[in-house]
């Protein structure tokens, strides 16, 4: 049964990463997208405030905004796949590139934000490898994703056949992302879920169901429609190897008389 469900989900995939990211930006302009953006922004403001460093890079802007304004990192950059997708920046810098090949030097970024990048990337594993490359030791990566084990996951099962964003994306569970990051040398330091309302498009109904946010955070916290996972890059340390001390080999085999030096005086000479 699970194999059949997996084959169905594979058929829901979006056409390409660039087209899917463009469709996601359009979807975030909808009432449901605006409601999710408000929840995700509050979550990011609370979580990124205490992450320090010198350089911050946000990869992608599906919400059409700079999500890092609450960060205390002074140098902030935002990377998008086309100049037309670059939103207005509040004190940051904009650049163009792909998440699978970041135009950034290795070991140079303190905090990397990936807002729904893995779900719509052509090669999500390569995106994480690039994250590992550009982050400094003890640097952090923050991943926003859609939770498949939620009402949104059920929505994907019902609507994914249309191949419309966001339902055609890879809804990767936070535990799978955690495993992938662990293989690359990351330790997960934070996992929080958000948005417990069903993915409905009617603004008035979304407002009336606002009480589900409080209930969800208290009674079913891991079933939020979206999540934020923050992981820290481990430092690769060298483990010193203690030398193996061996007793010094005797120059003369046991049982034989060893060399001696005797001082003899013969007429004042040695």
Image: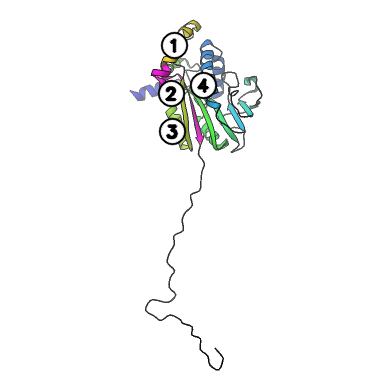
Q: Which residues are magenta?
A: 216-232
Q: x%, y% of residue 94?
A: 65, 25
How far is disc 2 from disc 4 in space, using C-alphas? 30 Å
How far is disc 4 from disc 3 in space, using C-alphas? 22 Å
How far is disc 3 from disc 2 in space, using C-alphas? 21 Å
Q: Which mark, by number, is residue 179? A: 3
Q: Considering only order in the chain, which callout, 3 or 4, is on the residue closer to the N terminus? A: 4
Pair 3/1: label in front:
1
Pair 4/3: label in front:
4
Q: Which mark, by number, is residue 93? A: none
224 part of magenta stretch: yes
Q: Residue, x 37% and y 22% (percent of image)?
A: 5
Q: Considering only order in the chain, which callout, 4 or 1, is on the residue closer to the N terminus? A: 4
How far is disc 1 from disc 4 in space, using C-alphas? 17 Å
- Image quadrant for the C terminus? bottom right
Residue highlighted by disc 2 = 10
Question: Is the residue 59 above or below the residue 23 in the image?
Answer: below
Q: Which mark, by number, is residue 43? A: 4
């Amino acid at each position: 049964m699970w194999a059949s469900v997996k084959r169905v989900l594979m058929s829901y995939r979006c056409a390409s990463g660039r087209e899917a990211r463009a469709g996601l930006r359009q979807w975030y302009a909808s009432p449901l997208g605006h409601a999710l953006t408000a929840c995700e922004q509050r979550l990011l403001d609370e979580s990124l405030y205490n992450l320090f460093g010198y350089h911050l890079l946000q990869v992608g802007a599906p919400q059409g905004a700079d999500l890092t304004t609450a960060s205390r990192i002074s140098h902030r950059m935002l990377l998008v796949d086309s100049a037309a997708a670059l939103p207005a920046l509040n004190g940051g810098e904009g650049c163009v590139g792909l998440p699978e090949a970041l135009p950034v030097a290795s070991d140079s970024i303190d905090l990397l934000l990936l807002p729904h990048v893995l779900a719509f990337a052509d090669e999500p594993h390569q995106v994480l490898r690039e994250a590992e490359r550009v982050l400094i030791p003890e640097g952090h990566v923050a991943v926003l994703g859609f939770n498949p084990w939620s009402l949104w996951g059920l929505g994907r099962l019902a609507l994914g056949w249309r191949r419309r964003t966001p339902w055609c994306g890879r809804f990767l569970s936070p535990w799978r992302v955690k495993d992938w990051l662990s293989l690359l040398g990351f330790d997960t330091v934070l996992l929080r879920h958000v948005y417990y309302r069903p993915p409905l498009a009617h603004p008035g109904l979304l407002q009336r169901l606002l009480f589900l946010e409080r209930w969800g955070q208290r009674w079913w916290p891991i079933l939020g429609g979206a999540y934020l996972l923050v992981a820290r890059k481990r430092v690769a340390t060298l483990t010193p190897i203690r030398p193996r001390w061996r007793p010094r080999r005797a120059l003369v085999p046991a049982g034989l008389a060893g060399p001696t030096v005797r001082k003899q005086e013969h007429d004042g000479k040695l």
